[in-house]
Structures are given as C-alpha cells and as structure tokens.
Image (cartoon, helix red, strand yellow):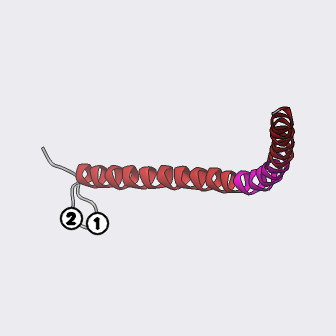
Amino acid sequence: MNSRLNMSGVKFSQTVTVAGFIMGFVTIWIHLEICIAEINVDLTNLKQDVIMHKTDNRKDMELLRNDNNDNTLEILRKVDEIQIYLRNKK
C-alpha cells in the first residue's frame, strides 16, 4: 500500500492530522478570546453600575444620617423633658 506524499515528503494522513490539530488549537483560542471579551464587557458594565449606584447610595446615606440626627435630637429632647419632670416632681 503506497501512501501519497506531498511536497515536503510527509504523508497526506499526517498532514491532515497536523492541520486538524492546529485548527483545533485555533478554534479553542478564538473561543477563549470571545469569552474574555464578553467578560471584559460585563466587567465594564459592572464598574459603571457601581459608580452610578455609589452616588445614589451616598445620597441615601446622607438622607438617612440627617434623619437619624433629627430623631436623636428629638429623643434627647424627650429625655430632657422626662428628667426635668422627675426633678420637679421631688
């Protein structure tokens, strides 16, 4: 059984095998590059969301802090009234 040889003296079946192997590597490499690009896009979107929500959260925290301060002052006023009432009762 004679095998066909191509120009470089390698059998045709070996050439097809090596070409398939190289094509497999190229296919995997392209797939990985696409996946990395998708991850980069997702990461960029997440960074933008974090930046956008950071300012919203800062505003919300400021409102909560102000409300907390107001409530604390109101509680302190009530405690003072109770203390004054208790002192005057004696």
Q: Position of residue 9 (x, y in %)?
A: 21, 64
**Where are the magenta residues, as a range?**
48-66
Which residue type carries mark 2? Gly
Is 83 on the left or on the right of 40, as rendered? right
**In the figure, residue 74 lies in which quadrant?**
top right
Is 61 on the left or on the right of 42, as rendered? right
Residue at 70% over, 53% down: 50
In front here: 76 or 57?
Answer: 76
User: What residue is shown with label 2?
Assistant: 9
Is 19 on the left or on the right of 28, as rendered? left
SS assignment at label 2: loop
**In the figure, residue 86 lies in which quadrant?**
top right
In front here: 6 or 78?
Answer: 78
- Give the distance between the C-alpha atoms of the residues marked 2 and 1, in whole angstroms: 6 Å
Above or below, 61 relative to 10:
above
Above or below, 49 relative to 90:
below
Question: Is the C-beta separation of discs 2 and 1 under 8 Å?
Answer: yes
Q: Position of residue 23 (x, y in %)?
A: 40, 52
Which residue type carries mark 1? Met
Residue furthest out toward the bottom:
8
Residue 49: in magenta span = yes
User: What residue is shown with label 1?
Assistant: 7
